[in-house]
Amino acid sequence: MDESVKVKPAIERKDTDLLAYERTILAQERTLMAWVRTSLSMISFGFTIYKFFGDLKKGDLLPEGRANAPKNFGLILVGLGTFLLIAASIQHQMILKALRVEGLTRRFSLPFTAAVAISLLGLIMLFGIFFNLGPLG
């Protein structure tokens, strides 16, 4: 065999490359946590408006014109916060899938778990407000 023809080895990953991927994944988790905080604020603010003005309406302290306005505004905020959190979670998973490389092990993502749990609670809250069911209605 001719020694001048050498087979190139497979692409070697440097430790710095792996660390760069790790930093990018951690940045994605911080971004998802920012979405969790923003969505949770929207959901809780919408629910607070709904309950506060609902209690004022029960005590006849609220004028009768536009009696459904607080409920509608609360529904919009809870729905928007929940939708944005679901969309951010899907985007997070898509980006992580694109970033997977050899040498990095898939690990448990606490921000993603929190996002899923809060999304489920937001959906339950949205359902309860919309249909006036349970302790939320």
Image (cartoon, grey):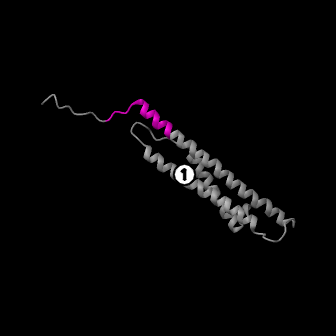
The quadrant of the rendering that contains the C terminus is bottom right
Quarter that holds the N terminus: top left
The stretch of residues the image draws in magenta is 11-24
Check disc 1 and report its element: helix, strand or loop. Answer: helix
Extreme residue toward the top, this view: 3
Give the tally of numbered discs. Answer: 1
Q: Is residue 10 left or right of residue 131?
A: left
The picture places residue 30, in percent across and down from the top left corner, at: 57, 42
Main secondary structure found in the magenta portion? helix
> Is 26 left or right of 122, judged from the image as shown?
left
Identified by mark 1, the residue type is Ser
In the image, residue 53 above or below residue 92: below
Q: Residue at x 71, y 61 (%)?
A: 74
Image coords of residue 14 (percent x, y): 39, 31
* Residue drawn at (43%, 47%) of the image: 98
Q: Residue furthest left?
A: 1
Residue at screen point 55% across, 55% down: 87
Counting from the top left corner in percent of width and height, residue 113 is at: 57, 47
Q: Nearer the viewer, residue 29 or 114?
A: 29
Taking depth in this image into account, of 25 and 137 the one nearest to the observer is 25
Residue 44 location, quadrant: bottom right
Tell me what residue is drawn at x 52 percent, y 49 percent.
92
Q: Position of residue 27 (x, y in %)?
A: 54, 40
Judged left or right of residue 72, residue 119 is: left
Q: Is residue 119 magenta?
A: no
The answer to whether residue 25 is left or right of residue 84 is left
**Residue pointed to by mark 1:** 89
How dense is the environment of label 1, judged by Cα within 10 Å: few (below 14), some, or many (20 and up)?
Answer: many
63 versus 34 height, above or below: below
